[in-house]
Image (cartoon, rainbow, N blue to C red):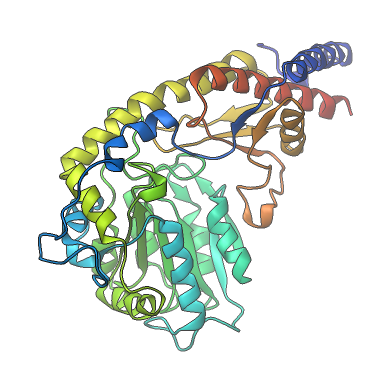
Amino acid sequence: MTTELSQMSHDELSALLDEQHSLHAELKAQGLALDITRGKPSPRQLDLSRELLSMRVPRHAADGQDVRNYGGAKGLPEIREIFAELLGVDVDHLLAADNSSLSIMHDLLTFAMLHRLPGAQAPWFGQNIKFIAPVPGYDRHFAICEHLGIEMIPVEMGEHGPDMDEVERLAADPSVKGMWVVPMYANPNGVIYDEETARRLVSMKAAPDFRIWWDNAYALHHLTDAEPAPLPILQMAQEAGNPDRIFMLASTSKITHAGDGVAFLASSTGNLDWYLKHASVRSIGPDKVNQLRHAHYLKDAGGVRELMRRHRALLAPKFQIVDSVLKRRLDGTGIARWTHPAGGYFVTLDVLDGTASRVVALAKEAGIALTPAGSSHPLHDDPHDRTIRLAPSFPTEGELQAAMDGVATCVLLAAAEKLLG
């Protein structure tokens, strides 16, 4: 389609509406059951690491620890050394934990609510604290704040990160205590934070107990031959005189298996000592058997990079399908634009203002599950009702082709309804 819908006559829009109604009816008649709601690895991706389920694991780590027993709160040196290299941090500033980095993020924030952070005058509980929330952003980040009653202030994302003038203005308020950041292939729009943005974040004026949750979930998840290295953010923070500002998180959830992965926390010595003090009450050490299994399976940083290239071979064609279908069905209509990420797990589709919720509802009627409209914004409130997150990873290529064709029909149908309304 080459004509913008806003330029169509009433009769032309009515004809388009009738056409899309017919296509939508055909979709419903097919009895589809397609799900592109979450960025889950596909079974083929999980099978890349199936050896983990059967390999033998020694009883002792390189430092002599019996991995079957209690202790070892910092995690095994073997797995920490591999990921310290990959994440660009000193191994002494990196902890290895259980499978979920989201659990660590939740614990960090909960501990800060209940126990005084380094630099804080008091625990955050009972204070009217606020977090900066770049939008569109990651719904599970926002859910932690919502669950704990923390106010979130949306800041629009740009090409290299959020609007830093606005971030700096907000951070100067002492009641603003934190910020969510996905620096590499941001969820959901694929933005890569550049060095200038990162340096401004670690240098800006903020409360002494202001922290950035630097979620490096997709640092190794490239979709092209270009494999940019993660920014050395802990070193940048140290150089800026704010060594405690960063909590860096990462995991193997989309590298090996989400169900038996290893999560990581990197930060300053003061932050890590504080975290371990409180985490030791919650747990007497992580799953060291699994950490050793991962270290033996991955072998070294090069082994991880090679495994991620095998993931890329499975994922990149799916992102190409999304782009190809959207381009064929929606290019030139003036009612949709979408991202072309170089990595990560998502494509952001922006539709005609006021129609995202309708698109999601129409897709549901046709048996296509999309992430609920508004999920990319705090409290599920997208003021423009325009942003939809697409997750191409889990379906087969055939299923994804059908799903995206259906989504395009729903976008056109919702837009025609809106413009005729």
Residue 91: percent from left, percent from top: 18, 62
As displayed, is residue 398 above or below residue 377? Answer: above
Residue 288: percent from left, percent from top: 26, 60
The answer to whether one can see residue 145 in this image is yes
Q: Which residue is drawn at 32% across and 54% down?
A: 262
As displayed, is residue 213 above or below residue 349? Answer: below
As displayed, is residue 374 above or below residue 321? Answer: below
Instruction: Name the image quarter holding the C terminus.
Output: top right
- In the picture, measured across the screen, residue 87 lies left or right of residue 102, that is left
- In the picture, measured across the screen, residue 264 lies left or right of residue 378, that is left
Q: Residue at x 36, y 30 (%)?
A: 223
- Tell me the quarter of the picture where residue 41 sits: top left
Residue that sits furthest to the bottom in the current view: 121
Label total for image: 0
- Tell me the quarter of the picture where residue 307 sits: top left
Please tell me which residue lies in front, 382 or 319.
319
- In the picture, measured across the screen, residue 14 lies left or right of residue 92, that is right
Residue 59: percent from left, percent from top: 16, 58
Please tell me which residue lies in front, 320 or 33.
33
- In the picture, measured across the screen, residue 405 lies left or right of residue 391, that is right
The answer to whether one can see residue 134 in this image is no
As displayed, is residue 178 above or below residue 55? Answer: below
Please tell me which residue lies in front, 347 or 335.
347
